């Protein structure tokens, strides 16, 4: 089991001014920032990141949304990071997200849902390496 996860603050939350509040939630929950950058994904890069969802009906919309404005990408460290972070962000659809979770507080709808969280240790590593060089991570 790894103690790392990967997250993005998505374009909707950036546009709505929630970067600071979302980072505070991560800190309060005990996550340490290992890597972080403010960046803007091209449609090609967003498509590559979400390649696993290529056959899903929402893929085109997702790629368009994720490349629609800047994001904050980060690698976070904590014991049981992947599962604990998924609990902190809440369900994919904010209407179903538990009260107090980041998506319940800051997401707009099931597509524009404020944050990404890796769903496995394997994907957390893949996603961290997709966005960051080894020299940009500080353990
Ligand atoms: N998504 C969407 N419509 C859906 C399901 C997902 O637009 O019906 C988007 C949403 O932004 C979600 C992302 O696709 O966060 C990836 O979907 P996944 O099922 O992996 O949800 P997550 O792991 O982000 O909770
Ligand atoms: Mg997912």
Image: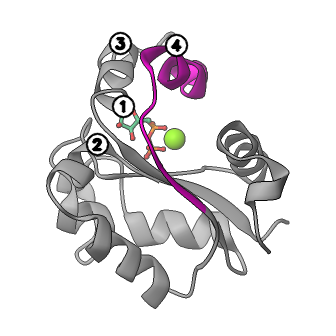
Q: Are marks 3 and 1 in contact (CB under 8 Å)?
A: no
The image position of residue 130, as x and y in percent, is: 69, 37
**Looking at the rendered structure, which numbered label has been put on residue 66?**
1
The image position of residue 121, as x and y in percent, is: 76, 54
Q: Quadrant of ligand 1?
A: top left
**Looking at the rendered structure, which numbered label has been put on residue 24?**
none
Residue 23 lies in quadrant = bottom left
**Looking at the rendered structure, which numbered label has been put on residue 60?**
3
* The CB of the residue at mark 1 lies under 8 Å from ligand 1: yes
Secondary structure, mark 3, is: helix
The image position of residue 108, as x and y in percent, is: 15, 48
Q: Residue at x 58, y 28 (%)?
A: 49
Q: Which residue in the structure is indicated by mark 2? A: 11
Q: Does 46 sit above or below residue 70?
A: above
Q: Does 48 sit above or below residue 111?
A: above
The image position of residue 10, as x and y in percent, is: 34, 46
Report the magenta residues as a range: 36-54
* Marks 3/1: CA–CA distance: 10 Å
* Marks 4/2: CA–CA distance: 20 Å
* Marks 2/1: CA–CA distance: 6 Å
Crowding at dot 4, Cα within 10 Å, few <14 / some 14-19 / many 20+, comes out as some
- Earlier-in-chain disc, 3 versus 2: 2
Q: Residue at x 25, y 78 (%)?
A: 100
- Earlier-in-chain disc, 4 versus 1: 4
Asked whether, in this view, residue 17 is left or right of residue 49, the answer is: left
């Amino acid at each position: 089991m790894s103690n790392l996860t990967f997250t993005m603050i998505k374009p909707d939350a950036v546009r709505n001014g929630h970067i600071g509040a979302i980072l505070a939630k991560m800190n309060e929950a005990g996550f340490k920032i290992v890597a972080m950058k403010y960046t803007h994904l091209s449609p090609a890069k967003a498509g590559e990141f979400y390649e696993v969802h290529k056959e899903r009906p929402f893929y085109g919309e997702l790629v368009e949304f994720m490349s629609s404005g800047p994001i904050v990408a980060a690698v976070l460290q904590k014991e049981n990071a992947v599962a604990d972070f998924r609990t902190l962000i809440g369900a994919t659809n904010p209407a179903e997200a538990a009260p107090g979770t980041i998506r319940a507080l800051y997401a707009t709808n099931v597509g524009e849902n404020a944050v990404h969280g890796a769903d496995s240790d394997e994907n957390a590593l893949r996603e961290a390496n997709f966005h960051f060089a080894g020299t940009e991570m500080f353990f």
